[in-house]
Image: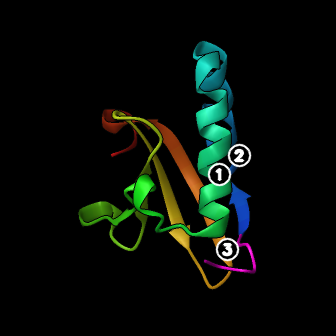
Amino acid sequence: MNLNPMRLELEKGFLKHAKKLLKKNPLLQQTYEELLRKLSINPFDPSLHTHALSGGLKGKYACSLTYDLRIILNLYDDIVHLLDIGSHDEVY
Protein backbone atom coordinates (compact mmCIF):
# COMPACT_ATOMS: atom_id res chain seq x y z
CA MET A 1 0.00 0.00 0.00
CA ASN A 2 1.22 3.49 -0.87
CA LEU A 3 1.84 5.42 2.37
CA ASN A 4 2.07 8.72 0.50
CA PRO A 5 -1.20 9.28 -1.35
CA MET A 6 -0.98 10.43 -4.93
CA ARG A 7 -2.32 13.85 -5.78
CA LEU A 8 -5.44 13.93 -7.94
CA GLU A 9 -5.61 16.58 -10.67
CA LEU A 10 -8.94 17.00 -12.45
CA GLU A 11 -9.28 18.59 -15.88
CA LYS A 12 -12.10 21.12 -16.35
CA GLY A 13 -13.75 18.79 -18.86
CA PHE A 14 -13.57 15.93 -16.36
CA LEU A 15 -15.21 18.06 -13.66
CA LYS A 16 -17.96 19.19 -16.03
CA HIS A 17 -18.75 15.64 -17.16
CA ALA A 18 -18.56 14.24 -13.59
CA LYS A 19 -20.93 16.92 -12.27
CA LYS A 20 -23.43 16.22 -15.07
CA LEU A 21 -23.15 12.45 -14.57
CA LEU A 22 -23.63 12.66 -10.79
CA LYS A 23 -26.57 15.06 -11.14
CA LYS A 24 -28.23 12.57 -13.49
CA ASN A 25 -27.29 9.56 -11.31
CA PRO A 26 -27.00 10.70 -7.66
CA LEU A 27 -26.70 7.09 -6.45
CA LEU A 28 -23.24 7.00 -8.06
CA GLN A 29 -21.86 9.64 -5.66
CA GLN A 30 -20.58 7.18 -3.06
CA THR A 31 -19.06 4.87 -5.72
CA TYR A 32 -17.40 7.89 -7.37
CA GLU A 33 -15.92 9.12 -4.07
CA GLU A 34 -14.63 5.63 -3.25
CA LEU A 35 -13.01 5.37 -6.69
CA LEU A 36 -11.22 8.70 -6.18
CA ARG A 37 -9.98 7.53 -2.78
CA LYS A 38 -8.68 4.27 -4.26
CA LEU A 39 -7.00 6.11 -7.13
CA SER A 40 -5.13 8.32 -4.68
CA ILE A 41 -3.91 5.30 -2.71
CA ASN A 42 -3.18 2.87 -5.55
CA PRO A 43 -4.22 3.61 -9.16
CA PHE A 44 -3.77 -0.10 -9.93
CA ASP A 45 -6.08 -1.38 -7.18
CA PRO A 46 -7.55 -4.55 -8.74
CA SER A 47 -11.12 -3.34 -8.16
CA LEU A 48 -10.51 -0.38 -10.51
CA HIS A 49 -9.52 -2.55 -13.50
CA THR A 50 -6.95 0.08 -14.53
CA HIS A 51 -5.38 -0.68 -17.89
CA ALA A 52 -3.18 0.99 -20.48
CA LEU A 53 -4.86 2.24 -23.63
CA SER A 54 -3.71 1.92 -27.21
CA GLY A 55 -4.34 3.64 -30.50
CA GLY A 56 -5.14 7.34 -30.28
CA LEU A 57 -5.14 7.15 -26.47
CA LYS A 58 -1.78 5.35 -26.21
CA GLY A 59 0.10 6.49 -23.10
CA LYS A 60 -3.11 7.03 -21.15
CA TYR A 61 -4.97 4.68 -18.83
CA ALA A 62 -8.60 3.87 -18.12
CA CYS A 63 -10.31 2.58 -15.00
CA SER A 64 -13.87 1.50 -14.33
CA LEU A 65 -16.41 3.39 -12.25
CA THR A 66 -19.21 0.96 -13.17
CA TYR A 67 -19.70 -1.73 -15.79
CA ASP A 68 -20.10 0.91 -18.54
CA LEU A 69 -18.60 4.08 -17.02
CA ARG A 70 -14.90 4.74 -17.51
CA ILE A 71 -12.39 7.32 -16.37
CA ILE A 72 -9.50 8.24 -18.66
CA LEU A 73 -6.34 9.33 -16.86
CA ASN A 74 -2.63 9.95 -17.06
CA LEU A 75 -0.21 8.76 -14.41
CA TYR A 76 2.89 10.66 -13.36
CA ASP A 77 5.28 10.08 -10.45
CA ASP A 78 2.91 11.19 -7.70
CA ILE A 79 -0.02 12.56 -9.73
CA VAL A 80 -3.17 10.94 -11.08
CA HIS A 81 -4.41 13.33 -13.78
CA LEU A 82 -8.10 12.69 -14.52
CA LEU A 83 -8.96 13.62 -18.10
CA ASP A 84 -12.48 12.41 -18.86
CA ILE A 85 -15.38 10.40 -17.49
CA GLY A 86 -18.31 8.84 -19.30
CA SER A 87 -19.69 5.75 -20.92
CA HIS A 88 -17.40 3.43 -22.85
CA ASP A 89 -18.60 4.91 -26.15
CA GLU A 90 -18.25 8.53 -24.94
CA VAL A 91 -14.64 8.37 -23.77
CA TYR A 92 -13.03 6.06 -26.35
Q: Residue at x 34, y 64 (%)?
A: 51
Q: Position of residue 20 (x, y in %)?
A: 63, 23
Residue sticking out furthest to the front: 1
The answer to whether the residue labelled 2 contacts the one labelled 1, judged by CB atoms less than 8 Å apart, is no
Quadrant hosting residue 8: bottom right
Three-letter amino acid code at the position of disc 1: Leu
Say above or below: 47 vs 91.
Answer: below
- Location of the N terminus by quadrant is bottom right
Q: Position of residue 16 (x, y in %)?
A: 67, 34
Q: Is residue 65 left or right of residue 83?
A: left
The answer to whether the residue labelled 3 contacts the one labelled 1, judged by CB atoms less than 8 Å apart, is no
Q: Is residue 13 visible?
A: no
The secondary structure that dominates the magenta segment is loop
Element assignment for label 2: helix
Residue position for label 2? 12
Residue position for label 3? 79
Residue segment shown in magenta: 1-6
Q: CA distance from mark 2 to mark 1?
A: 16 Å
Residue position for label 1? 36
Q: CA distance from mark 2 to mark 3?
A: 16 Å
Residue sticking out furthest to the top: 24
Task: Please tell me whether residue 84 belongs to the stretch shown in magenta.
Answer: no
Q: Residue at x 46, y 68 (%)?
A: 44
Say above or below: 73 vs 58.
Answer: above
Label 2 or label 3, whichever comes before in sequence order: 2
Q: Position of residue 33 (x, y in %)?
A: 68, 41
Q: CA distance from mark 3 to mark 1?
A: 12 Å
Say above or below: 90 vs 4.
Answer: above
For discs 3 and 1, the disc positioned in front in the rendered view: 1
Element assignment for label 3: strand
